[in-house]
Amino acid sequence: MTTADVIIIGAGVNGASTAFHLAQAGVKRIVVLERKFVGAGASGKSGALVRTSYGNKPETELALESLTYFKHWKDLVGGKCGYRPVGLLLFTRPQDREDLETNVALHQQLGVNTRIITPAEAQALDPSLYVDDVTHVVYEPESGFADPNATTYSFMQAASAQGVEFRTDTPAVRIIIEGERVKGVATAHETIEAPVVIVIAGAWANQLFAPLGLDLGLIPRRARVSVFRWPYQRSPQHLTYLDRINRMWARPIDGNCTLVGVDREQLPTGDPDDYAEGLEQDYIALCREYLSKRFPGMQASPMRGGWACMLMDSPDGHPMIGALPAYQGLYCMAGDSGTSFKTAPAIGKCLSELITRGSSSIDLTPFRPSRFAENALWQDDFRYGIERARISR
Ligand SMILES: Cc1cc2nc3c(=O)[nH]c(=O)nc-3n(C[C@H](O)[C@H](O)[C@H](O)COP(=O)(O)OP(=O)(O)OC[C@H]3O[C@@H](n4cnc5c(N)ncnc54)[C@H](O)[C@@H]3O)c2cc1C
């Protein structure tokens, strides 16, 4: 029988960030249990866009706080996160102009470096863009992308340096409850006692919640991305793009390719223990079609790869972060909804503050896991004609 002060289940970017922040806050015995390897879930396969343009205040605050980490990674965490501030362009329909202006004004009030530019200015930033369908474009010069694996590894290394124990190839089999509080976690080989258990298990979270009678409305879904080589005519001035008209996002990868995700319909449900990691031909064709709408020259792009991954959708598309009131000492970051890489630094920081101090510097109330049981799900204030955006949001 081993004991710990805190057990974290899952070594993705959010588990590693939370471990790092708890150690920084002075928590001594932290064990992270990982069923496979660090980054084995959505984190290792993330598109890893780093941006602040959310259609709601709570996630904007998490993204903005996290951007400070990406910008000052060496000082705040150490190691590398691969942050590349190539800039972000956001495309919305001409009829959404008023909403967009209000949304951008909110971002500016919160301190985000963002502004609305003309289509011609957007084209000057990337001459390969098609802009005849837009009248205004949002530009975030400090946004871009990071390396999701390097980010996770450096959180893990910085946490380990402070004494956190990462146990890979060690699935948590069961969360142990005594009365109305958590007592620890059982693995295949032993039981570890701890007064605090945090479930950050991505698409696998239901396997741990169900035996406790917890239903947060979470659904594991399969998401896909593909990679296209730039044709010789494509300008190398390649930013990161969020295209709400074509329901597509894109970023540069490997110096001469575009990583693209198309988000046109509900992602299919899937079994995180048994899903295909490769791509289907129809998805590749869909990516080429919508990528070429924004970058016509990319019709001539050789396809160079892609992958699929399981993520966990929450019932309102926003993550569930905080205490699970049914059991004292039980917390979670669950239902990442395909959007919780860029916010992971702040999520780890705020969860750590909540556990060690009872409150967090950014208000986590909107993210409380109990909102599903309370029937208090929420929507983005600004949706740009997309009722429920999925990864591209
Ligand atoms: C294709 C794709 C593109 C994306 N693009 C972006 C983007 O551009 N920007 C953005 O912000 N987000 C993006 N996301 C979402 C982002 O990657 C995820 O929200 C984030 O990585 C979730 O991290 P996590 O640590 O919460 O979960 P995960 O990374 O899924 O980690 C969970 C970990 O828990 C482990 N685990 C599960 N069950 C157990 C158990 N019983 N015992 C022990 N370990 C267990 C798993 O093996 C896994 O390693 C994207 C996701 C996908 C799939």
Image (tube, helix red, strand yellow):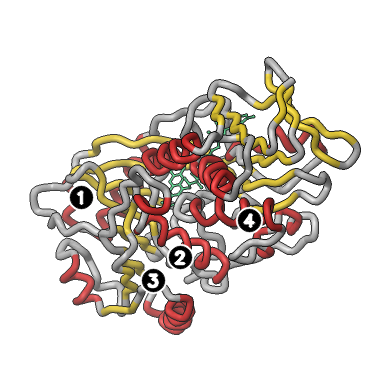
Q: CA distance from mark 2 to mark 4?
A: 17 Å
Front of the two marks 4 and 1: 4
Residue drawn where x is 19% and y is 76% of the image: 120
Disc 2: residue Cβ within 8 A of ligand 1's nearest atom: no
Mark carried by residue 64: 2
Q: Are marks 4 and 1 in contact (CB under 8 Å)?
A: no
Front of the two marks 2 and 4: 4
Q: Are marks 2 and 4 in contact (CB under 8 Å)?
A: no
Asked whether, in this view, residue 33 is left or right of residue 119, the answer is: right
Check disc 2 and give the amino acid type. Leu
Front of the two marks 2 and 3: 2
Residue drawn where x is 20% and y is 51% of the image: 298
| Residue position for label 3 | 92
Residue 307: image location, x then y, percent: 38, 35
Check disc 1 and give the amino acid type. Gln
| Residue position for label 1 | 299
Q: CA distance from mark 4 to mark 1?
A: 48 Å
Between disc 1 and disc 3, whose residue precedes? 3
| Crowd tier of the residue under label 3, counting other residues whose Cα lies within 10 Å: few below 14, some 14–19, many 20 or above | many
Mark carried by residue 353: 4
